[in-house]
Image: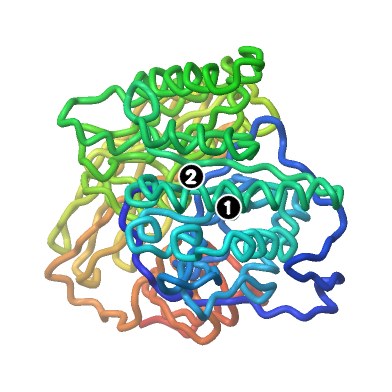
């Protein structure tokens, strides 16, 4: 991806033993035949440096397949890749091994991705860093056998795209790995993730693919990054996705004249940057854009649909700039994942679904007064359905009412939050949840109370997207809670006596 990625050390790592793995794997060994990816797959990027669990986020979002970003060397000149170039995160079962096995056991898989903006601009993309083709090939093999995966991705952009020596080494190394995989009966696909214009690849991207053809290297998927155009134009991001993909298709037709039209589209991948991209609001990929791109991708029969990045699929910074942990637009958590997820396996027409939003999404009141907001619903796919509304997360001294408490998707309701003088000053996240036959969606209202005379909780407020470990304390609804073990997304007070949260009493 084009965003500058920081080298944040992983906060957690899962240790496993060889007995738990059940296989002893080496860089050149073989393992039981892995399951090939579906012909059409949704595989959003997972930011591997955040300390979050890919298996947990896969389960929460419904994204069964993930593209894991990124693998790179720690320093230029090295031939050893690490996750994020962090030497504490080697390619081993101790780093993401348990998570990847869990994802695979649940019917999904991961696509390890080499490169990325930081590696490609610092000389730590492995084929730029290492001048020994055989060692580059061994590094690729080690990733394949350690995690038993069937696709590797090469995210090549900026300086790495113009490094013709590195391009040639990479393609030669991939060819060696493809020959090794064929000799050992392993399924292996290679995808190239490349920047694009609104009309298709730039000349250096085309040159990379030509080099692959000349080296006899099979490229299974060309995945274009349909964002960060930086041309100072206002963009319809869905339309630009289609024109960029058409340009790629036409290039592939020249490079592979023996392939049928459907085969060429079957080599196309698309990666969006959900919400506001690095350029700014003029390049904003909306949920409506996502639905349009989904329908087009299904009809066109492309191979891969993806976005940057899973951790951005939430609306916690609506109105903000591009960030690694939120989309910058108003949305519910996992909205984009839910639109794209049915693409895996060939795509299907989504059933009935709705969206939920609040206007405004925040407010400040003096203790003893009230705040109101409009709860809006809309038909996201299919037909309108009845949506029942409820409110949770209310702090002590605050009550809520909804008028009406049930609407037909497309309708709205008024949320009223009343505070008493005993309310505690502070900022609270109040959640409005809508439930219909298709499932539930939630949105949050940030309520700030001033002038209250209640007792203030000293622990940090609980946040649904934060990872907590055993012993950490939070405040929620006027009580202090202690986590008994690792948790995320589990609301204090709902897990029961034997659940993860222990109630330490009122603040």
Using a 10 Å C-alpha cutoff, classify the residue at mark 1 as few (fewer than 14 neighbours), some (14 to 19) or many (20 or more).
Answer: some
Q: Is tag 2's residue or tag 1's residue first in the polypeptide sequence?
A: 1
Q: Residues within 10 Å of mark 2 (few under 14, many from 20)?
A: many
Q: Is residue 385 above or below residue 180?
A: above
Q: At which x and y percent is residue 69?
A: 50, 57
Can the viewer see residue 320 in this picture? yes
- Report the residue at 25% width, 54% height from top: 418
Image x and y of residue 172, in percent: 60, 49
170 shown above or below 505: above
- Evaluate if marks 2 and 1 touch, with contact meaning CB atoms under 8 Å apart: yes
* 151 and 178: which is toward the camera: 178
The answer to whether any part of residue 315 appears in the image is no
Q: Please identify the quarter of the rendering in which residue 289 is found.
A: top left
Work out which quarter of the rendered image holds the C terminus and state it. bottom left
Helix, strand or loop at label 2? It is loop
Point out residue 25 in the picture as x, y percentages from the top left corner.
79, 70
Q: Position of residue 169 (x, y in %)?
A: 53, 53
Q: CA distance from mark 2 to mark 1?
A: 8 Å
In the rendered image, which residue does mark 1 sit on?
A: 60
| Placement of 339 over or under 264, stated as above or below | below
| Residue labelled with disc 2 | 334
| Residue displayed at 61% across by 72% down | 95
């Amino acid at each position: 991806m084009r965003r500058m990625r920081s080298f944040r050390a992983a906060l957690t790592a899962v240790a496993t033993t060889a007995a738990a793995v059940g296989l002893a794997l080496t860089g050149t060994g073989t393992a039981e035949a892995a399951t090939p990816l579906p012909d059409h797959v949704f595989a959003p990027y997972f930011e591997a440096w955040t300390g979050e669990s890919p298996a947990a986020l896969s389960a929460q979002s419904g994204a069964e397949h993930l593209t894991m970003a990124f693998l790179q060397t720690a320093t230029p000149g090295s031939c050893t890749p690490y996750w994020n170039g962090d030497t504490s995160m080697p390619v081993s079962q101790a780093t993401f091994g348990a998570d990847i096995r869990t994802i695979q056991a649940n019917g999904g898989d991961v696509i390890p991705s080499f490169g990325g903006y930081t590696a490609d601009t610092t000389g730590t993309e492995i084929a730029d860093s290492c001048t020994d083709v055989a060692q580059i090939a061994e590094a690729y093999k080690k990733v394949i056998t350690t995690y038993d995966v069937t696709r590797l991705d090469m995210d090549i952009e900026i300086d790495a795209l113009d490094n013709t020596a590195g391009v040639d080494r990479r393609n030669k190394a991939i060819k060696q790995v493809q020959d090794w995989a064929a000799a050992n009966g392993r399924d292996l696909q290679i995808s190239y993730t490349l920047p694009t214009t609104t009309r298709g690849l730039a000349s250096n991207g085309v040159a990379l693919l030509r080099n692959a053809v000349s080296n006899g290297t099979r490229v299974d998927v060309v995945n274009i990054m349909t964002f960060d155009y930086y041309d100072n134009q206002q963009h319809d991001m869905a339309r630009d996705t289609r024109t960029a993909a058409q340009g790629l298709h036409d290039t592939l037709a020249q490079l592979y004249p023996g392939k049928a039209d459907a085969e060429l589209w079957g080599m196309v991948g698309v990666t969006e940057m959900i919400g506001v991209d690095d350029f700014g609001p003029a390049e904003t990929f909306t949920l409506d854009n996502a639905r349009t791109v989904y329908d087009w991708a299904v009809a066109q029969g492309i191979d891969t649909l993806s976005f940057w990045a899973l951790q951005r699929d939430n609306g916690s910074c609506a109105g903000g700039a591009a960030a690694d942990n939120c989309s910058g637009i108003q949305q519910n958590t996992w909205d984009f994942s839910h639109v794209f997820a049915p693409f895996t396996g060939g795509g299907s027409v989504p059933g009935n679904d709705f969206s939920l939003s609040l206007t405004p999404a925040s407010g400040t009141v003096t203790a003893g007064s009230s705040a109101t907001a409009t709860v809006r619903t809309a038909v996201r796919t299919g037909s309108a359905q009845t949506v029942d509304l409820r409110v949770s997360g209310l702090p002590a001294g605050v009550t809520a009412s909804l008028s009406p408490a049930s609407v037909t998707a497309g309708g709205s309701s008024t949320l009223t939050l009343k505070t008493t003088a005993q309310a505690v000053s502070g900022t609270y996240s109040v959640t409005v949840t809508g439930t219909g036959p298709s499932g539930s969606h939630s949105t949050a209202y940030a309520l700030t109370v001033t002038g209250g005379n209640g007792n203030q909780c000293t622990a940090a407020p609980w946040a649904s997207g934060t990872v907590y470990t055993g012993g950490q304390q939070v405040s929620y609804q006027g009580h202090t809670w202690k986590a008994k073990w690792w948790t995320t997304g589990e609301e204090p007070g709902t897990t029961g006596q034997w659940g993860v949260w222990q109630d330490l009493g009122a603040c």
